[in-house]
Image (tube, rainbow, N blue to C red):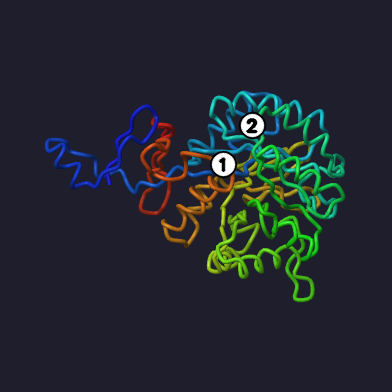
Amino acid sequence: MVFTVRNGAIAQRQAFEEWSRAWPKAVPPTHLGRLFPGLVDIHCHGGGGHTFCTTDPDEARKAAEFHHRSGSTTVVASLVTASEEVLQAQIRALRPLADEGVIAGIHLEGPFLAASRCGAQDPRYLVPPDPSMTRRLLETGEGTVVMMTLAPELLGADEVVSVLDDAGVTVAFGHTAADYATFRRALDAPKPRVVTHLGNGMAPMHHRAPGPVGAVLHKIATDGTSSTHIELIADGQHVADQFVAMLAAVGGEVVLVSDAMAASGMPDGPYRLGELDVVVQDGVARLANGSLAGSTSALADIARRSPMSLGALARYVGSGPAEALGLADIGELLPGSHADFVVLDEDRGVRQVMRRGEWLS
């Protein structure tokens, strides 16, 4: 397959034989590697020593550029739970990056989360679901907030969901203490939903208390191809590889995410996630209490270690996450789409990255 790129977009896609007939004297490079769609990471807090949880646009830009070079040509900047004042300031800092296309939008992971399942979210700033606060945050974002994670069992969650739905913001459920029935009811809404990093920030499945994991599996089983997109942090630490394989085998709309924090691509040592201290040891990020504190992997690292076929991976790190957030012109190598390519070597390592028609590496 031969792609023609113009003005940052894929202008044409041709079979090699057709292209050769049109350009008989041209000699295309054949040594580059395997062409793959640019990766789409819809849950990412930072990387390369930099964070999105900041009021400094330059700091956030450096985090985005690290992930671009790593192969994630589309990145959604995720913010952790903080005070409304801090979230407002962070949204204002990120908004110009979204307008510029450096990031694909903002994901608010909190502050309407269950205290008992908050993980690496700062419990000091957890608050009950507040529709008015939600409207204020969305107004500050001016259309750049594209997803919000909340716990569906909390009083007021339904009202916040209505605000998000009316604004066209993707609703994600996670960091939840919901039982099976509550979580299943939340998923059965007429609009598509996202489950934030299934298996993390929620109770494990038990045969007498199937919980959120059981609700997701049952929805897949009863609905066939589900409208629920399931985030998984398949870095070998957050969930077992067999768990990922099971979700894929039963037909779940799997979306692989990095959930990366500033330590992604960096050596072991002390870091910060929001206002919380994080220590990375042997490549694993944890809080002082032992809770996992995000991933130190870029999405390309997660894709590389996956046993899935490249065809399946293209769905799970490309068109699937783009579809989950309604992001257009990304995740697939089609005419009219952004010219976002990753060149993979024989071991699925990233050799080169093109973003919007320009080579980054």
> Measured from the top left, where is residue 357 in percent x and y?
39, 31
| Residue 197 position by quadrant | bottom right
Relative placement, left or right, of 156 versus 263 is right
Residue 265's mark? Answer: 1
**Compared to 289, does 122 lie above or below?**
above
Element on which disc 1 rests = loop
Contact check, label 1 and label 2, Cβ < 8 Å: no
**Count of numbered circles on the image:** 2
59 or 117, which lies in front?
117
| Residue 187 position by quadrant | bottom right
Q: Residues within 10 Å of mark 2 (few under 14, many from 20)?
A: many
59 or 266, which lies in front?
59
State the residue lying farthest toward the left: 25
> Measured from the top left, where is residue 95 in percent x and y?
64, 26
322 or 83, which lies in front?
322
Q: Earlier in the sequence, mark 1 or mark 2?
A: 2
> Measured from the top left, where is residue 332 in percent x and y?
43, 45
Name the residue type under label 1: Gly
Q: Which residue is mark 2?
A: 144
For the point 65% across and 41% down, which residue is it? 261
Name the residue type under label 2: Thr
Relative placement, left or right, of 14 versus 66 is left
The alpha-carbon separation of the residues under discs 1 and 2 comes to 27 Å
> Measured from the top left, where is residue 231 in percent x and y?
62, 54
**Compared to 137, does 169 lie above or below?**
below
Element on which disc 2 rests = loop
- Can residue 232 be seen? no
Q: Residues within 10 Å of mark 1 (few under 14, many from 20)?
A: some
For the point 29% across and 35% down, which residue is it? 4
